[in-house]
Image: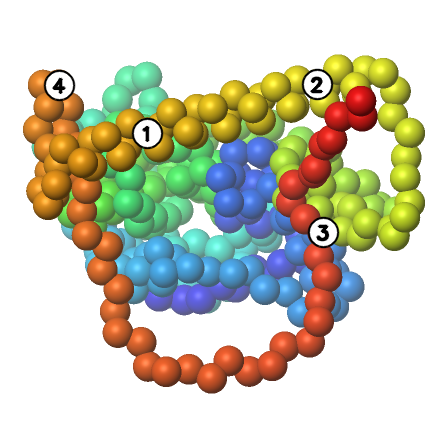
Amino acid sequence: MVGKVTSNKKASASILPAIMGHSKYDSRNSVLEKVCKANLGEENHWEGNEAMDWGNTLEPVVLKQMADRLRIAHDPDIDYAIIHQSIPLEASLDAIGFGTGKIISTDASKGIFVMNESGSIVLRGEGAMECKVTSVRPEDQPDLARGPLQLQGQMMCAGHKWGAIGVLYQGICLRIFLFEVHEPTVKAITEAVIDFDRRVHSAPLDWYSIDDTSDAILIYPLAEAESSVDLDEKNAKVLEQYLLLKDEIKQANEALALITVDIQKKMCNHAIANVPGYTVKWPMKNYKAQPEKIIPAKPATSSRQSTITVKEIK
């Protein structure tokens, strides 16, 4: 297994889901900021998590299983970035597979799914291999953020005609998804990458539209003391709806709390309740023993809140 080899200074295949608005973890603006910082020479952290650590650990095993099931040779030691010849896009590959011209068809018993209308694909020449590990239930078609966009970008950079995504679901079910080059996706990726690169080099920075609160805080991180802005009557209607929704949420939460307590009283010390048509679980939450810690001092900091406060003026 080889670590990250792309530069972080341009679009890479791995961030295509975010650039194209399909990532659950990164917004278009968050990856735009990271790439801009990399171009300015600022320290740039692409944070991982335990799931990603497990993915790295299991990657060699998954790749070997993929190659064995497809009956192809593979090279998992790709220690260089592959640069697209005409657009600002780069990619790193988990492995390269070596097809011999064999026809592979969908075979659910072997966990092989060919993602085209015919259900068959010819593995001829080199192909990109990508590995994913996830806790979600097995799918017959992977989510766009779980490999397909990344794989198409890898194939574009490498000039491959086929690619494979191996997804290990819940640690026990491996499924292999085989793809050909998909021209509409290639066109969409090309347009998205060119636009992303334009934004990276724009001055002032041309942000994407704000999609969520994290974006708003990223673009407007400071609240100037005592400053105010006047908004028109349309916004008064929006805030009226905001307060109504908050009240409905409060009432719903109160109703849920009453129902929860009612069920808990009836379950007593039982962990599971069997109800016609339903199963209710009220399990224990276990915490590991922790050694005593002395928390080091931290300097005072300020950051913008993620919520707004609305008060109706009577």
Comparing labels 2 and 3, the label whose residue is closer to the camera? 2
Give above or below for 192 relative to 47: above
Q: Amino acid at mark 1?
A: Leu
- Residue located beneath label 2 in the image: 240
Report, in whole angstroms, how far the alpha carbon at label 4 lies from the one at label 2: 39 Å
Mark number displayed over residue 304: 3
Q: Nearer the viewer, residue 90 or 18?
A: 18
Question: Which is more N-terminal, label 3 or label 2?
Answer: 2
Residue flagged by tag 3: what amino acid is it? Arg
At horizontal 39% and vertical 32% (from top left) the residue drawn is 143
Report the side of 205 relative to 180 (left or right): right
Dot 3 alpha-carbon crowd within 10 angstroms: few under 14, some 14 to 19, many 20 or more? few
Report crowding for label 4: few under 14, some 14 to 19, many 20 or more residues within 10 A (C-alpha): few
Is residue 151 something one can see in this rendering?
A: yes
The amino acid type, in three-letter code, at marker 2 is Glu
In the rendered view, does 131 fall on the left or right side of 5? Answer: left
Quadrant in which residue 140 is drawn: top left
The residue labelled by disc 4 is 277
Q: Which residue is mark 1?
A: 258
Secondary structure of residue under mark 3: loop
The image quarter in which residue 192 lies: top right
- Secondary element at image label 4: loop
Q: Upstream in the sequence, badge 4 or badge 3?
A: 4
Q: Position of residue 63 (x, y in %)?
A: 26, 54
Q: Is residue 65 above or below residue 177?
A: below
Q: Earlier in the sequence, mark 3 or mark 1?
A: 1
Residue at the spot 71% in from the left edge and 57% down from the top edge: 303
What separation in Å lies between label 1 and label 4 (alpha carbons)? 21 Å
Residue in the foreground of this view, choosing between 158 and 19 = 19
